[in-house]
Image: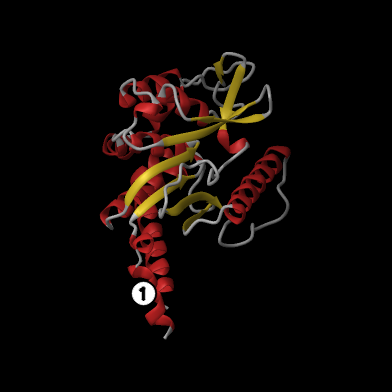
Amino acid sequence: MLRFFNFLSDMLPHRRSRNIALVLGGGGARGYAHIGAVEVLMEHGFNITSVAGTSMGALVGGLFAAGKLDELKEKVITVNRRKILSLLDLSPGLDHIATADKLSGLLDDIAGGMNIEQLPIPFCCSATDIVSGREKVFRSGPLSQAIRASISIPGFFSPVRIGNEVLVDGSVHNTLPLNRVERHKGDRLVAVNVSAPGAEPMKGSVPSNFLKMAMRIAQISVQNNTQMAEQITRPDICVDIPMDTFGLMDFEKGREIIAYGRRAMEQALEEWDDKRKS
């Protein structure tokens, strides 16, 4: 009887909807997994009607919304460590290690000077204003500038200055911006969280020095941020990719990380489908 009612429910117009509001989280190189996840959604016939992202989720989500995902993927799978170091523009200053001017230029080239409000798919991304202490949500203006602000890891990349705002990585405020994505009637909320807790507790003793301790505290903070976001705004489908799968700076492993994202989304869709049928 329950299966019969589930069948009837799926036949209702809002239940048959293949529309998706997609949210992509921050997590450094693990964010390459978003590329594979998006590919799988498209292959399964879902229609992504809006996107929100933070940090690498902003980069992948923004370029997908601009119709540039294939171009981004090509660059990701061909990059090597030398190219990565070149793009970072290592040039230590008082508030940064890298200026990322070349990365900004690359974003400009791919985005083609598009503004967010011109994108064929509604998009927004989060950054953090360290002057006001508030979250900055970009819904208009130059796409490349918004992405550059959202990926500005504090202390590593130079901040982005817009007027009186000094903007750094959106993960400080909103690693998984489920509450920011534009929603449409009958859509499904799908999230890809690439900063989930590890599959196993941290091995070994307490971190042995202040740097490792600071990194561990930052990990816990980000994990709690994403878990709280999922509890407050519950997605219909959530792909949780643990932090211990790939490192924050594993940018030369693009092909491998994209493949992992594909498998994770395939599994999430299968589990979601089984749940609906049970």
Which is nearer the eye, 39 or 6?
Answer: 6
Q: Looking at numbered disc 1 in the image, what kind of residue is underneath it?
A: Leu
Question: Split into 4 quadrants, where in the image is the C terminus?
Answer: bottom left
User: Outermost residue toward the top?
Assistant: 163
Q: Is residue 46 left or right of residue 156?
A: left
Q: Identify whether 39 is placed above or below 109.
A: below
Crowd around label 1: few <14 · some 14–19 · many ≥20 (10 Å): few
Question: Split into 4 quadrants, where in the image is the N terminus?
Answer: bottom left
Residue 105 occupies which quadrant of the picture? top left
User: Outermost residue toward the bottom?
Assistant: 1
- Residue 177 placement (x, y as % from top left): 54, 43
Q: Residue at x 53, y 17 (%)?
A: 91
Q: Residue at x 72, y 46 (%)?
A: 208
Which residue is label 1 attached to?
8
Residue 75 occupies which quadrant of the picture? top left
Q: Residue at x 57, y 13 (%)?
A: 163
- Residue 53 placement (x, y as % from top left): 47, 39
Instruction: Assign a secondary structure to mark 1.
Output: helix
- Residue 255 placement (x, y as % from top left): 33, 46
Q: How is the image coloured?
A: secondary structure
Label total for image: 1
The reply to whether residue 35 is in sight is no
Q: Identify whether 277 is placed above or below 149.
A: below
The reply to whether residue 131 is in sight is yes
Q: Is residue 110 left or right of residue 90?
A: left
- Residue 17 placement (x, y as % from top left): 34, 58
Q: Is residue 24 left or right of residue 64?
A: right
Which is nearer the eye, 85 or 4?
Answer: 4
Q: Identify whether 231 is placed above or below 125.
A: below
